[in-house]
Image (cartoon, helix red, strand yellow):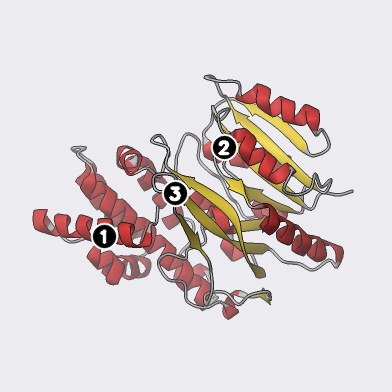
Amino acid sequence: MGKTITFGIPCYNSAEYMDHCISSIVEGSGYAEDVQVVIVDDGSTKDNTLEKANEWHRLYPSIVDVVHQENGGHGRAVMCAIEHAEGEYFKVVDSDDWVDAEALQDLLEKLRSFVSFQTRVDLVVTNYVYEHMEDGKQHTVDYGFALPKGKILGWSQIGHFNMTQYMLMHALCYRTDVLRSCGLDLPAHTFYVDNIYAYVPLPHCKTLFYLDVDLYRYFIGREDQSVNLDMQIARINQQLTVTRIMIRAYHLYDDIPEKRLRSYMIGHLTLMMSVCSVISKMSDAPDARKNLDDIWHEFKRYDIRMYNRARHGLVGTFTNFRGPVGERVTIGIYHAAQKLIKFN
C-alpha cells in the first residue's frame, strides 16, 4: 500500500511530551498503513528523545520511521522529513502539539478520495486550536467566509482573510511534490521558519480545499517556547531573518498574477513586518531600532509597491508610530489585541 500522507515530527529534547504527539497520529489514524510518521531527532542531547523515537519504530515499523541528524534547528528538521516522506501529502506536527483523532479520520478520508480518483489538490487547509495552558482555555482559528467549504478551489475563488486567519503551518497539508519543487529552503538554527513554510509554496499550489475540522492542537504555555513573548524579544534578529527571506521570495505585483492570492500574501508579509516592528520596540537591545529601520529600508529598495502597501496601510501605520509616546501606543495596541484575540 502506498502512503497517503506523511507526518513530519521535528524533535529536539522532546522526550517529555513527544509520545502524546506521536500517539495522536498513530492511534488516531487507527494504525493506518497508508500513514507514515517521520520522526526527526534533531541532535537531541539532554534526554532520551532518540530512544523513544526508536521504540515507536520498533512497535510500528511499517508506520513510523526515524531519522537522526546533527542539530540544525526546526527548519532543517522539517526539510529532512520532507526528504524522507513517502506520502502523497505532507504535514508538520511539532512534537509538543497533537492532532484530534476524529478530525484526523476526516482528513484521511478526504485525502484518500483525492488519491483514489487521481484528483489533483495541492493544498488542504484545516482549522487549528490554541490550547492555552495558563487558563485551560481554547481558541479556534477557522477559515469560514475566507474559504468556501468542501470545494476544490483556485485562488480566484478565495475570500477575504482577516488578521487572525492567516494560514500558518498548523493549518496546512501540502502535496509533497509541491514542497519538493517550489524551492522551499528553511534556514538552519533559526526560529519562526514556519512562516516561510506557510508562504513560499503558495503560488505553486494551483488547487486547494478547505476541510472545516479542528485538526491541529497547538500547545501554548512553555516558558522556552519560541512564541513566548520573552523568547520573541530575545530572538528578534531571527524574526528579522525570516521576514527578509519572505520579502525576497517574490516581487508580488510582478510574480503573482492571481489578485486574491497576491492580496493574501501581501497581507501576510505586512503582518510579519508589523510583528518585527512591535517586538523591536519592546527590545532593550541597543541595535534593535537600527535593525528595524534597516529592514524597512531594504524592503523599500527591493520593491516600492510592496513596501508602500505594508508600511502605509492601517496595520503598518498603527505598528510604526514614532517617538517614545508613539512606541508606547503601538505596544499598548499590540497587548490589547493579543488579550482580545489570544493570538501568538
Callout 1 touching callout 2 (CB < 8 Å):
no
Residue 76, label in figure: 2
Residue denoted by label 3: 136
Residue type, numbered disc 2? Arg
Counting from the top left corner in percent of width and height, residue 138 is at 47, 55
Counting from the top left corner in percent of width and height, residue 314 is at 28, 71
Does dot 1 land on a helix, a strand or a loop? helix
Q: Mark 1: few, some, or many residues within 10 Å (few <14, many ≥20)?
A: few
Towards the viewer: 342 or 230: 342
Res 133 quadrant in image: top left
Query: Which of the two discs, 1 and 2, labels the residue nearer the N terminus?
Result: 2
Q: Left of 321 or right of it: where is 105?
A: right
Q: Left of 64 or right of it: where is 324?
A: left
What residue lies at 47% left-to-right and 72% top-to-bottom? Answer: 161
Q: CA distance from mark 2 to mark 3?
A: 32 Å
Instruction: Say above or below: 194 vs 128.
Output: above
Query: Which of the two discs, 2 and 3, labels the residue nearer the N terminus?
Result: 2
Residue type, numbered disc 3? Gly
Does dot 2 land on a helix, a strand or a loop? helix
Callout 3 touching callout 1 (CB < 8 Å):
no
Residue denoted by label 1: 336
Instruction: Say above or below: 1 vs 54.
Output: below
Counting from the top left corner in percent of width and height, residue 265 is at 47, 66
Instruction: Say above or below: 136 vs 164.
Output: above
Q: Mark 2: few, some, or many residues within 10 Å (few <14, many ≥20)?
A: many
In the image, which is nearer the foreground, mark 2 or mark 3? 3
Q: Seen from this angle, which residue lies furthest front?
A: 136
What residue lies at 68% left-to-right and 74% top-to-bottom? Answer: 150
